[in-house]
Structure formats: structure tokens, C-alpha cells
Amino acid sequence: MRSNMQALSGKSINPETKGSNTLNPNTIVRRAKAIVFEQFDDELLAVDSEANVCLSLNESAGRIWSLIEVPTPLSAICAQLCNEYEVDEETCLRELSAVLQQFRQAGLVYTDD
């Protein structure tokens, strides 16, 4: 995982977040929208025509998106990422939480604590 992850570019779809502001290992992450991303070089790109925005996910954020195809606890996402990337659990949880906060602010996911 990249230590400084700018996961999502484009303007926010929805400035209000859904769920609490604090993510913990038991937090369940769910996709809020059925947005189709297409691979383009090292990024996933999508256009949300309803919100009139273009979204871009880097490689790490794209992997996170694929791991939440079904509702998934934060701890399970982190465990998988720790297996795939050279990252310790503490760093993974911190960076994963930051990416998921960006996803929430963009209206892509919501969380259940």
C-alpha cells in the first residue's frame, strides 16, 4: 500500500457522509452506488452521470473497491490488504480508514458500526 494515498480524485458527489465519522475494525462497509469502473493504465475510472463527475481510483483504492463488492468488515478488508501489500496492520487501518472516508464523502459507500 502506498503510504500517502490520494485515492479519489474528482469533486465530491455528496458532501454529507453516511454513518459515523469514526471507523473501527468492526465497521461494515457497503457500496452505496452501483458505479462501473473501467481499468485505464494503473487507475480505475468511472463517470457518474447522475452527479456529473468523473472518478479516478489509484491501484490501492481500486483494490479496496473490489474488496467491498459485498458488505465487508473493515478488519477483513485490512487483513486481505496486509496479505497483499507490505504494510503493518496499524498503518493499513489508518490508510484504509482515510480512503473509506473519501469514498463516504463522495457518496460511494456507507458504513454500519
Image (cartoon, rainbow, N blue to C red):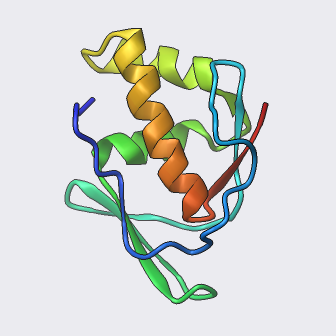
Name the image quarter holding the N terminus. top left
105 on left or right of 90: right
In the image, what residue occupies the spot 41% across and 11% down? Answer: 89
Residue 25 is drawn in which quadrant? top right
Above or below 63: residue 17: below
Name the image quarter holding the C terminus. top right
Above or below 59: residue 74: above
In the image, what residue occupies the spot 63% across and 87% down? Answer: 50
Residue 36 is drawn in which quadrant? bottom right
Instruction: Kindly give the residue lying farthest to the front in the view shown.
Output: 21
* x then y, percent, for residue 7: 35, 51
In the image, what residue occupies the spot 44% across and 44% down? Answer: 99
* x then y, percent, for residue 90: 40, 13
In the image, what residue occupies the spot 55% across and 25% down? Answer: 77
* x then y, percent, for residue 39: 34, 61
- In the image shown, does 45 or 26 lie closer to the viewer? 26
* x then y, percent, for residue 42: 22, 54
